[in-house]
Every structure is written in C-alpha cells, then in structure tokens.
Image: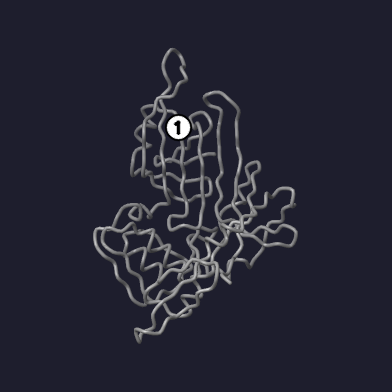
Amino acid sequence: MNIQLEDGSTIGGDDLISAIYRTDFVPVPVTLEAVVKADERLSQLFTIGRQLATPKGVPLVIVKSQVINEQSVKAGRRIGAIHIIAVMAGCEPLLGVTKKAVSLENTSFNEVYRALGAKLRIKRDVKLSSFVCLKGQLPTAPIAAALQKEAAIICHTDNGMEVIRLNELMSGEAILFDKSAVQWVEHPNAVRHSNTNYLSIDDDGSTILGTARAERSIRYYPRADNRELQNLRRILITKATITRQLDERLDAGKLIEVDDQRLVVLTAAHRYDTGALGGQTVMATKAWLAQIENTK
C-alpha cells in the first residue's frame, strides 16, 4: 500500500510496517490506521493535522500520532515506530464534542455537516425536515440518528461522498462471488434485538403514532411522523462475511451477488502487513455483507 504524504512523496513497504484501511456506513466513512518506521523525516510528516492520501486518492488527516518502541533491534539500535490514525479530510470536527448547539429546519446533510464544522461536500444529498445536535454532544450520534430517520446511509463512493436511501442502495451492478467464498451469519436473536418498534406522539399531544409489535423492543422517538417511524424500522443487518486475499473492489457500498442473493458491503477492512520487521507479508480484505431488514 503506497500512502502519499503531504510533501508529495510516498511511503511504501520499506518504511510501512502495517496498515488497515477501512470504509464504512458511518458519519466519518473512511479511516486509516498505520504503523511506520520512525526517522527524522517521517516524525515530522506523521504529526497531528498532517495530510495523507490513499492510493484511491481519498484525502485523509492525521488525528492521532503516537511514537512507540518496537522490540526489534537493527544495527545495535532499537527500531522506533509511529502509530497513526487518520480520518477523511474535513471530518475532524465531528470527532470532538460540539461547542454550541446546532438546530436546523428544512435542511440537508450538506448543511448539517457544514453547521457542525465539517469541511466537505456531499455530492448526492437527502433533505431533512429537522436536525438537532446539543452543545456537548458528539456530532456523529445525531447524524447517525438522522440517517436512520431517513432510511439512508452515508458513504464514500467512486463519485465522492454520497447519502443514499436504502431503497436505492441495492440497485446497480453487483460483483459475483461463489458461495464458497462467503461465510453466512445465522443469528436470529441479533436480528430481533436490532429491530426496534418506534413510537411517537402526534401534534394533538394524545394520539400515539406507530405500532408496537410483539417480540421487539420499543423506543419513543419525539417529533416523528408516520413516514419517519416507518423509516426507523428499516435497517441493515449483517448476513455474511468475506475474508480473502486483498480485494480493493470490496469497499463499503459495493454490491455483492451470491446465488442470486444481493448483499451490500457494510464495512470493508483492507489489511497490509509488509513484513518490514520480519514475519510474513499479509495483504487481506475482510468485508461484512448486509441486507435490508424490516421490522414485522
């Protein structure tokens, strides 16, 4: 994995010890965790706030940097290393609590991200009737709740940042995989616990909106109409995993087809162990595959 540094150079297998590149359906959808050999130049380039870029060109910003001592010794000196975590550039303000409350009406996720201090552009957006993030809250929690209320996900695709509704998520070209490559997950209790019946109160203050079905937990959701309550019941449930040699096609949002079943990559982690300190070289991908579930 070649990581482009802020000075335009790249770091390859000689200095890179390990890396995990992850894409996901979360408000900060791209992260990189890496360990590199420490020297004077890299110690300056791998500090908090420095920018990186992945081979796919996704800009990242370092939000954690830690110097660690490895057990390996070379030329009579212990080898130092730097452990960093980087997130998609522009999303750094979402990692800390808010300094002021944000309350928006008739808005969009683009406006929500900007109001919370994020500096990025969502190229495919969805409208929101309202959004509230209280002072002192971690912004990612109310963003995730707003996405669920609209039955939508946010991810980084080949076209950039996009908000996609669940009913549009499963359409498009899928990558074909043989069933032998997939490990299926059978966990009915997880499905039952994940599905929640949401109830709300109508504007008259007395009429209960929503339906409480048996064998499902119940949660009150304020100021939600019937459309939003229906959306809240539509969720993605992990149905399978794939672990294989490095396959960079498997990023979050990609469609997979196995025996005429369509699944979407919910989370993908690409792992690179270069063997720079000894041991085997590992380049592998693990993807969690999901389908849309509706509370019944």
Tell whether 21 sits left or right of 258.
left
The percent position of residue 109, horizontal first and vertical second, equals 41, 68
Where disc 1 sits, the SS reads: strand
Tell whether 129 sits left or right of 103.
right
Classify the position of the C terminus by image quarter: bottom right
Near mark 1 (Cα within 10 A), the count class, few <14, some 14-19 or many ≥20, is: many
Q: Total number of numbered labels?
A: 1
Residue on which disc 1 sits: 36
Q: Residue at x 74, y 62 (%)?
A: 260
Classify the position of the N terminus by image quarter: top right
Q: Residue furthest front?
A: 214
Tell whether 57 sits left or right of 260.
left
The amino acid sitting under disc 1 is Val
Q: Residue furthest top?
A: 76
Q: Residue furthest left?
A: 100
Answer above or below: position of 266 versus 46: below
Q: Residue at x 64, y 66 (%)?
A: 172
The percent position of residue 237, horizontal first and vertical second, equals 57, 60
Q: How is the image coloured?
A: one colour
Q: Nearer the viewer, residue 15 or 272?
A: 272
Q: Residue at x 44, y 80 (%)?
A: 209
Answer above or below: position of 195 versus 288: below
Q: Quadrant of residue 254?
A: bottom right
The percent position of residue 53, horizontal first and vertical second, equals 46, 46
Answer above or below: position of 17 versus 73: below
The percent position of residue 277, horizontal first and vertical second, equals 52, 24
